[in-house]
Image (cartoon, rainbow, N blue to C red):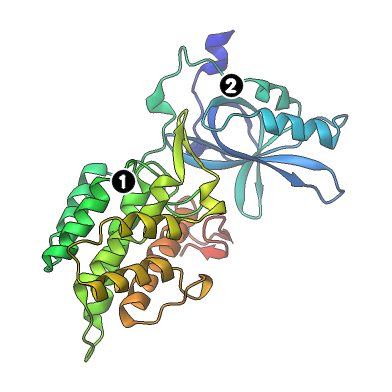
Amino acid sequence: MLATVVEKNVFVGEITGGVPVDAPFVVDSAEVREKKDGGKYIHLTISDRSGRGACKVWGTGSQSAEEIEAFCRGIRQGEVYRITGYAKVYNGTCEVNVNEGIFSLAEPLPLEGIEPSLFVYAPVETAAVRQGLARMAAMIGDPGISSLVGRVLEETPGFFEAPAAKRRHHACTGGLAEHTLETAENAVALAGSVRRAAMDTDVILAGALLHDVGKASCFRRQGFSFVALPEYTLVGHTAIGAAAVMRHADGVDPARFAHILHIIMSHHGPHGEIQPRTPEAWTVHFADNASAVLRGICDDTTDLAPGEGRHGGRFGGAVYRF
């Protein structure tokens, strides 16, 4: 019986609407949400090596909201569970719906017999990203700023393994480093495209390479996935990142160092507590946003056929494929 339960014969990327699903998946996140009638259901993000998907656990008709919440509290993120239900397309997105299969969520599957390579979603080419980041850092001419960037990245545990977000853009192993590389490349290209503008490229590169460094301290590995720590929302990665950078201020011109800190604290642009006030800060904000938004849109349209559209869960808006 155990061999049948843990057999991995269906992957997230293969699930289509109208078919039954009975296979093991990693549960990356689990949260209780309200139904239109006031009841409760569990929203899961499930994954395997092929990608991530959505799963809604409705439970049986006889289960109360309290029982549904109790099931959710017992789910251990990052562990592998048997998901038993049926696939349905809702608002253009395929999701697994679970009713009686809720009882399979009482305990994760034992690790014996589980092949990790089938369950870890890690599309990032880590070696290429490392080389790309080293290439961008080497473009910094100021020795003090170059040393600052090198020390911070070297002394930040998990920077090359952590995701860049909980569920939207670059939400996978290695996603933080990949997003950082894209942001640095975008920022340099943007700065070079503006005529008659004299920008501090060293400051732009340092700000781009360090803008999200605090996220490495906001996640920890659990099972086959990463989970966000309380610091992710209680403190925020910008403040954590700025604190890490401030420990390495020696050897950097004070004015340029303050400018780098301003970029880190303001890179969320109009949506952040600190607003960008310099061309360099706005450049990094736009570069960061371009990486995040385009990654989300690209992921949302990957499995669309030509002529199809839907609401993109990662992008947060309508997407379409020509």
Classify residue 309 by image quadrant.
bottom right
Going 41% across and 63% down the picture, which residue do you hit?
294
The N terminus is located in which quarter? top right
Image height check: is 24 above or below 284? Answer: above
- Seen as rendered, the residue at the extreme bottom is 196
Query: Within 10 Å of the Cα at label 1, are there few (<14), some (14-19), or many (20+) other Cα atoms?
Result: some
Q: Residue furthest top?
A: 1
* Three-letter code for the amino acid on which mark 1 is drawn: Thr
Q: Viewed as shown, does residue 262 lie left or right of 148?
A: right
User: Residue 171, position in %: x, y?
Assistant: 45, 48
Q: Residue at x 61, y 54 (%)?
A: 92
Say whether residue 59 is left or right of residue 272: right
Residue that numbered label 1 is attached to: 156
Q: Going by the image, does 126 lie left or right of 54?
A: left
The foreground one among 265 and 119 is: 265
Where on the picture, by quarter, is residue 211? bottom left
Residue 282 versus residue 13 in the image, above or below: below
